[in-house]
Amino acid sequence: MNIGFLGLGIMGRPMAGHLKAAGHDVTVVERRSLTAEDRANFAVAPTAAAVAAGAEIVILMVPDTPDVEAVLFGANGVAAGLKPGTLVIDMSSISPTATKIFAERIKALGGEYLDAPVSGGEVGAKNAALTIMVGGAQASFDRALPVFEKMGKNITLVGTENGAGQTCKVANQIIVALTIEAVGEALVFASKAGADPAKVRQALMGGLATSRILELHGERMIKRTFAPGFRIELHQKDLALALSAGKELGVALPNTASTAQLMASCAAMGGGAWDHSGLVKALETMAAHKVAPDA
């Protein structure tokens, strides 16, 4: 297929690379940040409109709701070059409410729309092992599935209404954030009590408390490796979406709110670009004790 891919970030670049390796023709938009390797691997078009004009499928992988809106509907955006029948797939993590509006606008132009946010971080993107949560029509999902299979492993059509995928992603981010907080809290407690946090983690990995968060992010907390990964500032955005949606729905999310405050504390310390496992640093500050010495 001819696929337009907009957003070559930490995750977008390997995702687009997998599509190219699978034999698809991938076009990206001109950016000063494009590497020599990008220019060798992908066709380059001057604008998002030009990318859309030559594509059967357009994939977005950008940071936030305003970015998606700008790429779709800004000057020389996707909408300006969209052909009837083109499938737009937003794999960013954004507002479920805004997603429904964006989908209707694209459909009014004759396009199809899927929201398909992902989980798995940089490692999952590089290994083509992302979890992909999709909202949209069954026929559009069936059309996109061979493309999704080149980027992910666990691919689920959550609902046939747009926004269902983004709602699922918000739920995912609540669980991930609260589990990171729980792992950080446990390791700070264990370390300050005099136990070896590495040994505590090893023991917990064999019991009911085991999780991928304990495995991966617990190790980061102990080894002090806080290069992203997935940045705290992006997880802050996701928790803000959760709290906003919770308010709209009348659903209390007390632990989501407290974890969002811990992330805000990290950002205030200059850690917005830390990996989200760096949330432990807020807990360490309150305990006046680090899980392990900084490298």
Image: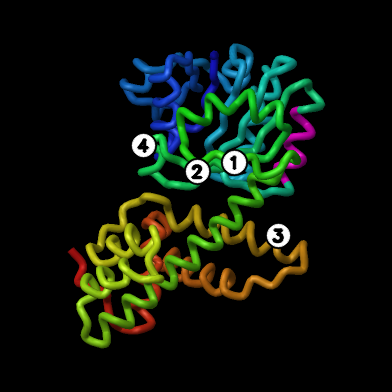
Disc 2 target residue:
131
Amino acid type at image mark 4: Lys
Residue 158, horizontal then vertical, whole percent = 66, 44
Residue 30, horizontal then vertical, whole percent = 47, 21
Mark 3 and mark 2: Cα distance apart in space = 22 Å
Amino acid type at image mark 1: Thr
**What span is in magenta?**
98-106
Q: Nearer the viewer, mark 1 or mark 4?
A: 1
Disc 3 target residue:
245
Residue 200, horizontal then vertical, whole percent = 26, 75
Q: Which disc is residue 126 wearing?
A: 4
Please, what secondary structure does the residue beneath circle 3 have? helix
Quadrant the N terminus occupies: top right
> Overall secondary structure of the magenta stretch?
helix
Please, what secondary structure does the residue beneath circle 1 have? strand
Q: Measuring 49% from the left and 47% from the top, which residue is drawn there?
A: 119
Q: Is residue 102 magenta?
A: yes
Query: Does the CB distance between marks 3 and 4 fall below 8 Å?
Result: no
Disc 1 target residue:
156
- Which residue occupies the foreground of this view, 197 or 259? 197
Q: Measuring 49% from the left and 32% from the top, which residue is drawn there?
A: 7
Query: Does the CB distance between marks 3 and 2 fall below 8 Å?
Result: no
